[in-house]
Amino acid sequence: MDSYKTIVANSKFSEMITTAYSNLENQSIDIVLGNPSCDQDSFLGSHILAVMLGRIPVVNMQREIFECKHDLMKLCDILGIEIHNLVFLVYEENQWFLKRGDMRYRLSEKNVKAHLIDFNLPETSLIECKTFRVDRIIDHHQLIKYNKHVHSQTDGMEIELNAGSCCSLILRRINHLFADVLKEKKGTHDYDFLLLLSIPILTDTACLIRKQHDVDINGVNNALSIANIEFKTAKSVMCDLKHLKHCEAKIPTKMILRMDYKSFDYPEKYGEKTYGISSVKYPYEKWIERDGPAVWKEEIKKFVEEKKHEIFIINCKHHDERYLYVYCPSNMKDMIKTALFAGGTVESKAILNDEEIVIYHVALTTSRKIIAPAVFKYLDARKVE
């Protein structure tokens, strides 16, 4: 990974991001905002697109949670960004703030235009902030719920469900917008940092094995060619970061649940209810044995109550197997068979012989991208009680 750090250091990235951050003091600001689970796709995609556009990259997560993500902390090192220089979007004291180091800026006191990448609908309280507007969306997730205030006022939406990684779409957008500049600077190291967009593409497609969409293949080939990097080198870097990502054994449960978490709105007929999905890599047996079943269940309950969810799903992928833990009311237990197994055979087991901790074995491809719309569809078809 040291070679990647050198490549970024020899590029214009540091100069460009310094210029972008200098805009934070302005009354009107343009930002690029990744999704609230802030994985590699969102973090690298938002920062690289932002510097190319001269916008401020914003991390859609609290700093304390971000610091638990060891792979992203390493990416900060590769980018040459100190943690106190990142800009975080946080909800505190019933209002939204942008926080950078010791500085805190009320969103309500600025005029903010945002590109959303790797997601397509912000939280309701953010949408309701009158000084915040979405002007473009680049995503590879289904638009589950249309919001007139957000989606009818954008300058454009690029949503391609077949793309394995949003960074593939971001690189395509960059190539479209900056074709002349990139052609002029070819042979220099100015934009070699675009190489980093290959990392989440390789991560999200299992090195182009699990998914082979043209936009991902072209994205990897293009990103590697910019800095003249061989595929085997890129694969090695991706594997090193993957190892760092598996850090949850060292993290308390209350933080594990927040590290890769997303909230989704119910259909409108339910009012303002939400459901949540957390993705983890920590196998249930080791995780629950570490905490103890009683403590683990209490942490899940606290988290669900804090987020005011009725439905909460933990999606654990480990060693090419995927298991779900489903927290929901007893009158919604049919959701497991109907939504998560499409009416098919349900395969389940209790962890540590605790019948209150049942997990469900699902297909490896059953990611949050699949689960979220399936739950929404189930709720939409159900009568409100």
Image (spheres, rainbow, N blue to C red):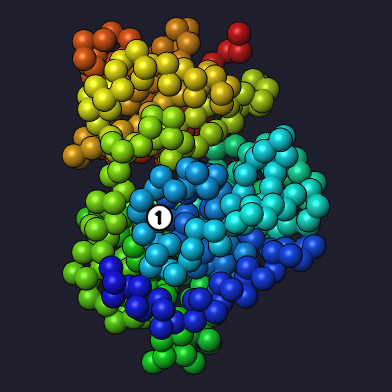
Tell me, yes or no, if residue 72 can be seen here: yes
Q: Is residue 142 above or below residue 134?
A: above
Q: Secondary structure at mark 1?
A: helix
Q: Nearer the viewer, residue 316 or 267?
A: 316
Q: Residues within 10 Å of mark 1 (few under 14, many from 20)?
A: many
Amino acid type, residue under disc 1 in the picture = Leu
- Indicate the quadrant containing the N terminus: top left, top right, bottom left or bottom right: bottom left
Tell me residue 203's x, y (percent).
31, 55
Q: Is residue 133 above or below residue 76?
A: above
User: What is the quadrant of residue 8 in the picture?
Assistant: bottom left
Q: How many marks?
A: 1
Tell me residue 238's x, y (percent).
27, 60
Tell me, yes or no, if residue 136 can be seen here: no
Please give the name of the residue rendered at 41% of the width and 26% of the height, measured from the top-left corner: 313
Q: Is residue 199 left or right of residue 113?
A: left
Q: Is residue 291 above or below residue 134?
A: above
Q: Is residue 178 left or right of residue 206?
A: right
Please give the name of the residue rendered at 54% of the width and 58% of the height, measured from the top-left corner: 84
Q: Is residue 307 above or below residue 172?
A: above
Q: Nearer the viewer, residue 280 or 187?
A: 280
Tell me residue 183's x, y (percent).
47, 89
Q: Nearer the viewer, residue 144 or 134?
A: 134
Q: Is residue 359 left or right of residue 11?
A: left
Please give the name of the residue rendered at 39% of the width and 35% of the height, measured from the top-left corner: 256
Q: Which residue is mark 1?
A: 72
Please give the name of the residue rendered at 52% of the width and 26% of the height, measured from the top-left corner: 275
- Indicate the quadrant containing the C terminus: top left, top right, bottom left or bottom right: top right
User: What is the quadrant of residue 52 in the picture?
Assistant: bottom right
